[in-house]
Amino acid sequence: MNRGFRLAVLLVIASAFAGALVAQTGFARPREPYVRGEQELRTGDLADAERDFRAVLSKDPSSAGAHANLGVVYMRRKEWSQALIELRAAEKLAPSVPGIRLNIGLAHFRSGDYGAAIPPLESVRHDQPGNTQAAYILGICYFLMERYAEAKSVLAPLWDAQSSNLQYLYVLGIAAGNAGDPHLESRSLDRLKDIGAGSPEMHLLAGKAHLARQENEAALAEFNAAIQADPKLPFAHYYLGVIKRKSRDLESAQAEFLADAAIDPDVPFNYEELGNIAAASGENRKAEEYLHRALRLEPRLATARYSLAKLYRAESRYTEALSEADQASKSDDNSASLHYLRAQILQKLNRMPEAQREFAISSRLREKIRDDLEVKITGNGFRETGLETQ
């Protein structure tokens, strides 16, 4: 399946908006670099486009179109933080333009911050109920945040347009099943198998569907079939590695995660898994290296920070352990396991009042909240990855 970031729509939105803004404002002096920047953006000359849009902003800092187009430049470079700075500036100057908010949602989505992507996408859907792109991405974000009823509600009306899209059918089927709609679940997954016609992508998605249902043997068969049909299919080795890890075959799991990392070196979860396997084997320095690599790719990955904190605690590196645990808490503060680990570290640092508070929080959370972080840490769950925008 095409895993590239689909920017054609973004370019059309940004370019159309930018041109309209210049015409409306009558701001003539920067028009030449503005138009030149648009052309450079279309042809992929990103450095030149950045220079020209910066030139526009040097003369007119209130040019929402220049900020919006700069945001697209940075999105194409996968520089998400910088993209969001420019897009937020454009939004502040032109809050009524849905295309800017759509790009903000896309930037958050592509950076893996699905929760942050939801509000701007919801606002686009509110202002443009017929915007199927915004609805589709919003549905995937709901799905990835395990808000299954909302995912089903947003995605189901797209059936006529999307029922030949394998990814759509997979996401809708799993969301419907978790939302208590077995009819729509069966309809979606049966359609997935019908139109997939034994393709590698269909085997991968069917395997993920079985994995979500804890049907590990059926999932294993599907992932093996996907790899047999296409040994370089992205994420097939990753999910096969998940199955091997769940069955405690760590050597085979390691081989699969390494194989997936060779296909796509930018997936942080492979390195997190490799780090945890290395730690379980007593190879602490290798584990630390892998976990740091995962965090360079995704600094918000709470489970990788949790694993690092455990590693540092075992080595009596308590200050570093606490730093990692604190960082993990910023991404997931409702984990009983994480609060318990922080309490243990604080105890070792002789910060007893704080340790006692953390033990108390951990105890309360264990009684009230399902610990999703713990499910991922212990390997009982699996990460949903590889979903893309249209």
Image: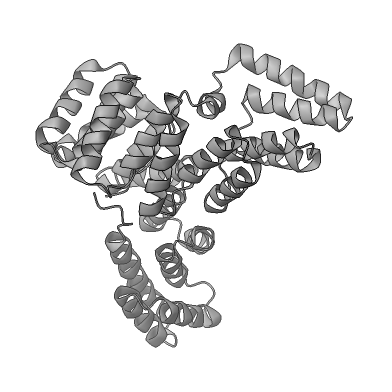
In this picture, residue 152 sits left or right of residue 318: left
Please tell me which residue is depicted at 86% across the width and 33% down the height of the picture. 349
Q: Is residue 296 above or below residue 172?
A: below
139 up-or-down from 41: above or below: above
Which of the 4 image quadrants contains residue 45?
A: bottom left
350, 124: nearer the viewer? 350
Where residue 246 appears, x then y in whole percent? 43, 25
Horizontal arrangement in the rendering, residue 88 relative to residue 232 (left or right): right
Left or right: residue 75 compared with residue 187: right
State the residue in front, 131 or 281.
281
Q: Is residue 28 left or right of residue 198?
A: right
In the image, residue 111 lies at what x, y percent? 47, 51
Q: Is residue 27 above or below residue 204?
A: below
- Whether residue 142 is visible, yes or no, is no
In the image, farthest residue toward the top? 367
Q: Choose between 91 and 86: the one closer to the eye.
A: 86
What residue do we see at 19% from left, 17% from top? 183
User: Image point 26% across, 17% down: which residue?
Assistant: 181
